[in-house]
Amino acid sequence: MQDIYVDEHTGVNILMSIHTLEPAYHPANKMGFMIDWILTMKCNYDCAYCTITGHDNSTNHPKFERCLQMLDQLYAYTDVMMEQKKPAFKDAIMSIAGGEAVYHPRIVDLIKEATQRYEQYSDRWRLTKRMTTNGTASTKNWKVLCDYLDGFTMSYHSTGPEKLKQQFRTNLEHLAKIKKEHDIIVCMYPMYWQDCLDFLQYCKENKFNARPKLLDGPLGIYNEQQKQDLSAFLTDEDLATISTESRVDEQSRGCCGGRKMCMNRNTKEYQTMVPRGKDGFLGWHCSANQFFIHGNNSTEQYFTNKDCRTKLDGTTGAIANIDTMSEYTEQLRSKKEIPMLVCAQTKCVCGTCAPKSTSKESLASIMSIYNR
């Protein structure tokens, strides 16, 4: 059992002893397998919180043929992971992203290929194709994308020019009109606070599925008034984990998708924000590799996910590149059981929702829910 001491300013004034984390269980929000496909690092925004790992306009768009090669490898790897899943959990979600994936010159062709190349696996597992986007594509291009995708995750950026913010609303309203599945992440910039609140209120009034996203990094410091403003959009429990004294990503963090989390195998209670200590989940046993794969066509590298760099051998780095991924996948296919990770990082961002525990046996018990 590992003790995680929560900052005294967060309002959580008790010692929280956390040894196990897992997502809350709900039939409509099952933990599927996330295929994170980065098509390009180019983006029409230059957000202050987004580092060079999030976008890089100095790079070229990856070549179409190399994108198809990575697509085939992502599907083959997913197929290996699906072999051990119980039928109810054979769901994969492909997140097509960037940079800003919309600006890859052959984006529509690539989405069509993603549909066609999945067909050989369609009798073994289910696939949902989504795009993670800043939602500022032209109206014409947006309508074309809607014809080929199952859903969208849109991130609203108050730092953008009014023209692009209006285009975001136009595209969002089109999704609502055609009843296309979507969710909205509102990036909460402290320096553009009122615009963030106004947009959240606009979503609330129009019954759009939006949630505030507190920023990771040095920009993610919020004052008491801002914390009070968030009470209209966050629960009291989640607000209690936010301190105005330091960066929020050093205090607690939730699932990128807003998934609720359970602690210490107590599945009757849950919360969105997970408190953590300075060492994060270092040394914990983690199943992130059984729920995520991240392929970046610009770097031609694969990682567990966009933030997790832990590998099966306990080191950190890329698990493979586009020239070695097929061999890596076949090595996993030959194993009787896919091994778990032992966390080698002190910071967990994407991957917080993956079941994890200080005990290998406890994690194995959780994974028996998902795996045969």
Image (cartoon, rainbow, N blue to C red):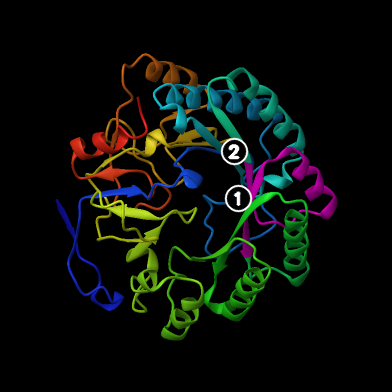
Mark 2 is surrounded, within 10 Å at the Cα level, by few (under 14), some (14 to 19) or many (20 or more) other residues, namely many
SS at mark 2 in the image: loop
Whole-percent x and y of residue 253? 38, 60
Q: Dot 1 corresponds to which residue?
A: 56
Q: CA distance from mark 1 to mark 2?
A: 10 Å
Say which amino acid is labelled 2. Ser
The relative height of residue 324 versus residue 172 in the rendered view (above or below) is above
Query: Residue at (36%, 29%) from the top-left corner?
Result: 371
Residue 138 belongs to the span the image colors magenta: yes
Query: Is residue 87 rendered magenta in the image?
Result: no
- Give the residue at the far top of this rendering: 334
Q: Which sits earlier in the primary sequence, circle 1 or circle 2?
A: 1
Mark 1 and 2 residues: CB-CB less than 8 Å, in contact? Answer: yes
Q: Is residue 249 left or right of residue 11?
A: right
Front residue of 134 and 360: 360
Q: Amino acid at mark 1?
A: Asp
Q: Which residue is mark 2?
A: 298
The magenta stretch is 130-156
